[in-house]
């Protein structure tokens, strides 16, 4: 017979382990990152692998660019495909949110995303995974029709188990169509971020702490990944300062489990997450990973984000410090974020309380049996 004390110890160990795991979960992983892409045979100008490389920079560094032979080789009336094998053969993963970013304004080839497309999921996990076969795929609900560039975030009503995602393109925009990035998440990153973001707008300033007047500040948390100028804050141009600060005040100390910043427009050379040092200055929080760590040499648009995967910290004040230079390498603090997400760890408080209460519960039950 298993002793109650043994059961109690096992339960506490399990719950403490779960609590530690939950407490560390902040940033939502992009499941499509660096996963292989298969596609319709065509004259690629820039590789299809750019669709999942975590970069949305200019040219060969971050854009999937399929050339004008699309219309001649494939046929202008025929669909064109690009599939991301997320789970691998005979496996599936759970996906709830999909993000697709096309050739947004300011990038080389702006407005040259396919006009009409649908994002589909792979019904079966078995091989072969052929992006060009029009069976075994189901529409996810994410689609674009007659647009000049595609960009958006779509959360499915319920999560789906799928091996792969596919972009099914049925209408060209121009002879040279481009897609920047496809991302997939097990949970909705925006919903995870909102508890920090609702009602908490940042104050923008330069490195000399001079505030910058902005409008449309709510665009930083509207879940809109069309990063053109109309969907970002509007601010005055500085020709003398390359630093733009986004200063948040949460009103009380909060736990931060991750930060993700989506940028377009300008050569962003660095993104740092900082907290007060107690002496009137700021300290950079260690443990983060910045995508696109080097600026694009042509000064064109890129998307950056800064993740904290294995650490969390408490703070009332949070600064996101970005450095932006224009195409000539001159300071240009008008390079603005299109979306900022600040994540809280999954709740551990309830699990902690339960773990603390179990010994009492077992003790009382054992005492009652005497």
Image (cartoon, helix red, strand yellow):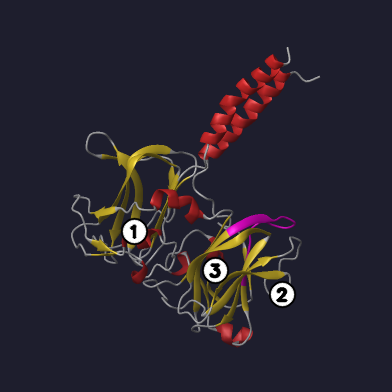
In the structure shown, which secondary structural element does the residue marked by tag 1 occupy? strand
Disc on the earlier residue, 3 or 1: 3
Residue, x 30% and y 62% (percent of image)?
335
| Any part of residue 98 in sight | yes
**Which residue bears the numbered disc 2?**
133
Quarter occupied by the N terminus:
top right
- Tag 2 secondary structure: loop
* Range shown magenta: 82-96
Residue underneath mark 3: 47
Give the residue at x 34% y 58%: 268
Q: Which of the marked residues, 3 or 2, is nearer the chain's N terminus?
A: 3
Query: Is the C terminus in the top left, top right, bottom left or bottom right quadrant?
Result: top right
Measured in 3D between alpha carbons, the distance from the residue under mark 3 to the one under mark 1, in whole angstroms, is 23 Å
Please, is residue 41 above or below residue 223 in the view? below
- Gap in Å between the C-alphas at discs 3 and 2? 21 Å
Please indicate whether residue 192 sits to the left or right of residue 204 in the image.
right
Membership of 135 in magenta stretch: no
For the residue pair 242 and 367, the one nearer the viewer reads as: 367
């Amino acid at each position: 017979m298993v002793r109650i004390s043994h059961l109690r110890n096992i339960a506490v160990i399990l719950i403490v382990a779960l609590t530690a795991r939950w407490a560390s979960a902040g940033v939502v992983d992009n499941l499509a990152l660096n996963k292989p892409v298969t596609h319709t045979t065509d004259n690629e100008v820039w590789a299809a692998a750019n669709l999942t490389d975590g970069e949305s920079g200019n040219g060969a560094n971050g854009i999937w660019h399929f050339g004008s032979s699309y219309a001649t080789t494939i046929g202008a009336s025929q669909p064109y495909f690009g599939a991301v094998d997320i789970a691998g053969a005979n496996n599936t993963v759970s996906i709830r949110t999909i993000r697709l970013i096309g050739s947004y304004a300011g990038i080389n080839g702006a407005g040259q995303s396919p006009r009409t497309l649908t994002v589909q999921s792979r019904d079966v996990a078995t091989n072969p995974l052929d992006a060009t076969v029009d069976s075994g795929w189901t529409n996810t609900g994410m689609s674009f029709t007659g647009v000049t560039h595609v960009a958006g975030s779509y959360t499915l009503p319920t999560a789906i188990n799928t091996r792969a995602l596919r972009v099914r393109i049925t209408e060209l925009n121009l002879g040279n169509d481009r897609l920047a990035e496809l991302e997939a998440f097990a949970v909705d990153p925006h919903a995870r971020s909102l508890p920090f973001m609702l009602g908490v707008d940042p104050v923008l300033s330069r490195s000399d702490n001079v505030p910058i007047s902005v409008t449309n500040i709510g665009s930083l948390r509207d879940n809109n990944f069309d990063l053109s100028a109309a969907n970002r804050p509007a601010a005055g141009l500085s020709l003398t300062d390359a630093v733009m600060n986004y200063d948040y005040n949460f009103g009380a100390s909060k736990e931060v489990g991750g930060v993700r910043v989506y940028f377009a427009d300008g050569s962003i050379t660095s993104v740092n997450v900082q907290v007060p040092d107690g002496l009137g200055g700021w300290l950079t929080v260690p443990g983060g990973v910045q995508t696109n760590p080097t600026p694009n040499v042509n000064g064109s648009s890129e998307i950056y984000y800064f993740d904290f995967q294995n650490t969390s910290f408490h703070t009332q004040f949070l600064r996101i410090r970005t450095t932006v230079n224009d195409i000539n390498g001159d300071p240009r603090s008008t390079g603005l974020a299109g979306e900022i997400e600040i994540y809280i760890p999954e709740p551990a408080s309830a699990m902690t309380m339960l773990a603390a209460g179990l010994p009492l519960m077992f003790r009382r039950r054992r005492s009652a049996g005497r």
